[in-house]
Image (spheres, rainbow, N blue to C red):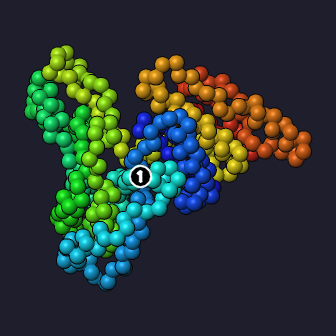
């Protein structure tokens, strides 16, 4: 069993289900229900969907020949490669398209694409690894020059010298875009060319031989436009989060906008970490896993509403410890064993929303949500 979640543009979980596998057929009922909820509420359905895999029609890349990666010509993008990658049917028949919105545009998440490149490096400790990651990231993302100039002007207004914005400030106050396919494939290819056959002082190469096949696979996605940002109006790729006085300096010149990225699945990674905090492990029943899952979803969405400063937000009572106690009592009468984790209020005083001590098979686990 595994869980599958869909987030909306506010990073709230729109749907969370347990499935036997992440095959499209297993996800169809979820997207059918999601479509019905949007229709019943009279809300326009999403037109863009970022995924971590299966973003376009299936294709096949042949295995490499021995030593093929040593010749740079094997890495080059030719007109015939572009034609082959972009010919025929490019869209897949994913569940979100067949069951939710027939016109939805499916995009590949940038983080997962870059992760596939970095995994083909020989080691994270290679002296060239950090530089490669920085240049690869710069190749995929282009900073909005208008936003960057406004940030530089704010630096000068605040008396910050030299007026060179930090990476954190650029990430918070400048929008970025992923270039169109032709430009993007050229930018990434130049980075790969720069590090082709490079080694450390011990003659250990930066790239594994399999990096060439990874490049050929990701190149197809790039050429098909799976990564490039769609040309859309405001509010699709970024959400305006108000303004901030840079370095708390008063004055109009120190005011910089806050841009909150909407596209991609990076927030899903944050949710996965959050999920690990309240799932007690792999040795629990499906019923308890689902109960814990619904609790986690409710708390995650509750926090997102607080982040959006929504008024009168109340955390819904999803998971009832008294119900678990009653089930354990009935189970003990029949099987002489407790079926579920029994919970009791923690005596520890903390700032957490919920403190509980969980006991199972004599082992004490401390869980704080």
Image-based side of 301 in relation to 104, left or right? right
The x, y position of residue 32, in whole percent, is 57, 49
Please determine whether, in this image, residue 34 is positioned above or below residue 259: below
In the image, taking residue 329 as reference, residue 241 lies left or right, namely: left
Res. 349 image quadrant = top right
Q: What crowding class fits label 1: few (fewer than 14 Cα within 10 Å), some (14-19), or many (20 or more)?
A: few
- Residue drawn at x 29%, y 49% is 230
- Residue extending farthest to the bottom is 66
- Residue drawn at 23 percent across, 55 percent down: 180
Q: Quadrant of residue 72?
A: bottom left
| Front residue (pair 206, 149) | 149
Image quadrant containing the N terminus: bottom right
Locate residue 8, reporting x and y percent. 45, 40
Task: Out of 254 and 359, give the one closest to the viewer.
Answer: 254
Using the image, determine if residue 214 lies above or below residue 160. Answer: below
Query: Residue 330: x percent and y percent?
Result: 86, 39
Q: Nearer the viewer, residue 367 or 225?
A: 225
Give coordinates of residue 92: x percent, y percent.
43, 63
- Observer able to see residue 15: no
- Total marks placed: 1
SS state under label 1: loop
Judge whether residue 354 can be spotted in this image: yes
Q: Which residue is mark 1?
A: 103
Q: Quadrant of residue 233?
A: top left
Question: Which quadrant does the C terminus fall into?
Answer: top right
Q: Residue at x 23, y 21 (%)?
A: 245
Q: Residue furthest right?
A: 333
């Amino acid at each position: 069993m595994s869980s599958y979640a869909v987030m909306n543009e506010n990073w709230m979980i729109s749907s969370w289900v347990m499935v036997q596998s992440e095959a499209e057929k297993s996800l169809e009922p979820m997207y059918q229900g999601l479509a019905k909820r949007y229709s019943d509420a009279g809300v326009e359905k999403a037109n863009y969907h970022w995924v971590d895999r299966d973003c376009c029609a299936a294709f096949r890349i042949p295995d490499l020949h021995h030593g093929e990666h040593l010749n740079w010509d094997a890495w080059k993008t030719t007109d015939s490669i572009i034609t082959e990658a972009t010919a025929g049917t490019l869209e897949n028949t994913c569940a979100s398209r067949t069951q939710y919105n027939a016109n939805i545009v499916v995009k590949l998440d940038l983080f997962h694409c870059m992760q596939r490149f970095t995994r083909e490096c020989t080691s994270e400790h290679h002296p060239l690894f950090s530089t490669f990651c920085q240049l690869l990231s710069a190749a995929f993302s282009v900073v909005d020059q208008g936003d960057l100039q406004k940030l530089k002007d704010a630096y000068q207004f605040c008396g910050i010298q030299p007026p060179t914005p930090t990476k954190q400030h650029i990430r918070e106050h400048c929008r970025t875009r992923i270039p169109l396919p032709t430009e993007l494939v050229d930018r990434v290819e130049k980075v790969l060319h720069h590090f082709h056959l490079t080694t450390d002082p011990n003659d250990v190469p930066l790239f594994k031989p399999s990096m060439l096949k990874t490049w050929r696979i990701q190149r197809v996605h790039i050429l098909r436009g799976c990564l490039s940002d769609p040309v859309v109006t405001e509010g699709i790729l970024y959400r305006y989060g108000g303004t901030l006085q840079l370095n708390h300096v008063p004055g109009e010149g120190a005011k910089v906008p806050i841009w909150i990225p909407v596209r991609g699945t990076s927030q899903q990674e944050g949710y996965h970490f959050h999920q690990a905090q309240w799932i007690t492990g792999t040795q629990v029943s499906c019923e308890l896993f689902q109960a814990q899952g619904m609790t986690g979803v409710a708390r995650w969405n509750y926090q997102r509403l607080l982040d959006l400063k929504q008024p009168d937000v109340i955390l819904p009572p999803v998971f009832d410890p008294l119900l678990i106690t009653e089930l354990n009592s009935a189970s003990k009468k029949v099987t002489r064993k407790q079926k579920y984790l029994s919970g009791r209020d923690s005596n520890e005083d903390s700032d957490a929303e919920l403190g509980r001590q969980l006991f199972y098979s004599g082992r004490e686990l401390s869980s704080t949500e």
